[in-house]
Amino acid sequence: VIVNKLLVSISSSLKELRRLAGARGVDVARNSVKPQDPSKHLRSGDFLNWDEPATVKAIVDADTIEHLHKQGYQVDVEEDLDALGKQRQALVGQGNRFAHRVRPQSPE
Amino acid sequence: MPNYYNVVEVETALEAFAQEHPSIITRFALPELTWEGRQCHAVKIASGTGPGRVGVYVMGGIHAREWATPDALVDFIEIMANAYDGNKGVSVGGKTFTWPKIRSIVEKLDLFVFPQTNPDGRHASLSVVDQTYWRKNRRPRSASDPTPVGVDCNRNFDFLWNYPTYFFNSGASVVNSVMPADETYIGPSAFSEPETRNIVSIVNSNPNIAFFVDVHAFGELVLQGWGDDETQTADTSMTFRNSAFDGARGVTSDAYREYAPPKDLAQRAALAARAQTAIAAVRGRAYKVQSSFALYPTAGTSTDYMESRRFVVPGAGGIRAFTFECGQTFFPDEIERSHVLNEVIAGLIELCLAVLDQPADVYVRDNLADSGAEPTPDGGLSMSPDIHHFKQSLGEPATTLGSAVAMLRNDLFEPIEKGQDNFLYVRLQNRGVAPSPAEVDIYWSRPSTFPTPSGWNLIGTISVPNVVPGQATIGGPLVWPTASVPETGHYCFIAIVGTPGEPRPNKSSIASMEDFQSFIRQNNGVAWKNFDVVDVLAGTVAQVQLMVQGWPHQELKADLEIDLRALPSQSSAELALLGRLTVGTTLSGLIPIETEGTRYTYRLAGGSIAVLRGMPLKPSDRSEVRLEVSLSTTTPAGAYDIAVIQRIEGREVGRVSRRLAVGDYPYVGNARTQELHRSNCEWVRQMWPGNKRAFREIETPLRSGYNGCATCLSEFDAG
């Protein structure tokens, strides 16, 4: 069974998002974490603001979204990665755009 | 309209660029094929060669689904080469770099670019319908099951790789995994993957690499600093190497934070800010500069490994590492891709320019493991390998002292000899990018476990016209004139380096023991050498004389530790010191022989450590201690390092180190009668072992007053 992979934004407190990061089936893009309010900061000096509402992007499948909802996370689907991937794969060169620029090397 | 480069195109592009720009682009093959048999290449962009060039290493594509990163580096190579060879500047979006800027990068730096580090994974992501989100490489599940399961190569580097040992703690949610099916599977061992070994091969082969960028997607970030925990600059013991902190790492806002030298931290922050500013000029996106330690800790990443190399790889220089997290998604559309590529290119060019603007940072090592970081992390403060003294001036000091092999040695010197001039050299390195002149003051003092500045005697100053980055520069000789040399023997030396940009630290600022420690530990331009080599014959006695010292106007309790672990167990030693130094002490490994009178004597066993705890020192105390090491006749030839270490409140304040070079020597002197013999002379066999002194040449003993034996060295017998 092929399960579509979805890119989602998951919102909760920073503390909850950190807890989520180790969960099976949730592939968190950790460097995408941002405060929900752009004027706020996730860090005060040396300390993280654990209670600050934040959003992180992750790759999950549809079943996992349901599971996350039940746990109280707000989950917004941003992209169907498989569908988007098919579109984007059409943007990948099929031949070799550099081949004509390479001179054959004489055999040694 | 196709725009992403497929896996073959990336490789072909490198070949084409190398052919089109042969004077500045060198393509080279990486040593290992990938799991699916692909051969990877990287390029070096540089015009000119020679010492002093700083290397910058950029890599991309380690995570397969981050499509834009190899493309950005392919375009980066081509743009740089076309601009340099075409005598023109570079414009990427709203950011412009002039031709002189591009020229300075190509002509002054060695730029290594490895665009496609994980081609197997990329190929799957680019071409297999339901694999676009594939992150890892394509390691098969097992020999019998070729199904790709993959390893996250950016968790496979040898930095805290075995994370359960280092992190296991309920508060540290490391997302690495030992489960092959997981996205962050770390692999069966550190560097188990050909992709990570290929990446590291470039730094192994190019020791001048001092800056590293790993290009990822996404997040619009420039990351720097450690990823295993937050970063701190005060406690040098709090490091990934210290097993005392195993289990404490990775917890946010707790006591444990990974140590980074303050200079490094400031430098990385400044460089990252330059890249950020250039990226913003492309189209206004405000990439954030932040610590690599974000939502959760990481282990086994490329950047932490690169930063850690100088602490764990012998001879490795410091590398300041960065991660670019470019764009806002894994595979942007055509227009967005173009913007993201421009942002990466602008960030990289500006980072290179910032590297070129880095000032000189001339240093002299405190020990062989010292990479110039401040403060010196560990390895001893009195073991500088970079202060050298010889009885004659060297013909080719750059070769004798500056070769790669010589840089790994701390025994390139000869004993100081009275009755003649002695010649001093200093070995300098430069952690910066700009070359700089330097002046080095050299002091001597008596061998002591705690040579306070009041006992330092200035010999003179060595002027070095130009210390270039990336190589050792030898300064000297400074002549220590015969009239100023008190006697033949062992001395302690201190070197203090000054440059136009960083004047010599002032030794008069030392007002306390802590100041003294900091003066050496905190200044990479100050080094102390209290290490010497003693030639000795098996079956004889080696003597070490030294001073233990107190601090002015202060009574102290100190521990004296005698480290004889390197000696064979058949050997032994005797320690003689003033009886008053033993009052109230606790002895460990010291067996009393004589404890009456003024001087007490103790026996110590070879192969062990002995400690005298709580030794009372008067203000300005200076007391001689004598250690006589008796080597058994069966002691194999070789080098045996011993040390006498003085600690105050548990901290090492100094040590006297000696290497006992046991071997066969052509001449043997009688220390009591001052008669010199060939080693096979009958009189040598009759000599008391404690009086035997070994010499590797004849001039030294003759100059210091020995008389030739009438039987075996009659030509040197003065009667």
Image (cartoon, coloured by chain):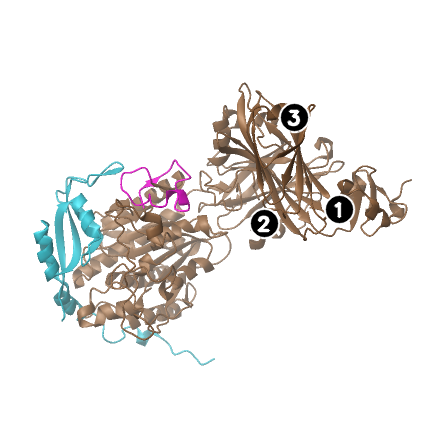
Residue B308: give x, y in percent of width and height.
40, 49
Q: Are marks 2 and 3 on the same chain?
A: yes
For the residue carrying disc 1, how many other residues have a C-alpha within 10 Å: few (<14), some (14-19), or many (20+)?
many
Q: Nearer the viewer, residue A9 or B39?
A: A9
* Up-down relation of residue B579 to residue B112 (above or below): above
Q: Which of marks 2 and 3 is nearer the N terminus?
A: 2
Answer whether labels 1 and 2 touch (C-beta < 8 Å): no
Dot 2: chain letter = B
Residue B283: give x, y in percent of width and height.
20, 51
The magenta segment is: B229-256
Residue to which mark 1 is pinned: B695
- What amino acid is at disc 3? Leu
Task: Using the image, tell me which numbered label, if any, was put on residue B578.
Answer: 3
Q: In this view, does A56 lie to the left or right of B231?
A: left
- Residue at image coords 61%, 25%: B581
For the residue carrying disc 3, how many other residues have a C-alpha within 10 Å: few (<14), some (14-19), or many (20+)?
some
Q: Marks 1/3: CA distance?
A: 31 Å
Residue to which mark 2 is pinned: B409
Which lettered chain is shown in brown? B
Q: Is residue B505 magenta?
A: no
* Quarter of the view holding residue B542: top right
Which lettered chain is shown in cyan? A
Dot 1: chain letter = B
Q: Marks 2/3: CA distance?
A: 36 Å
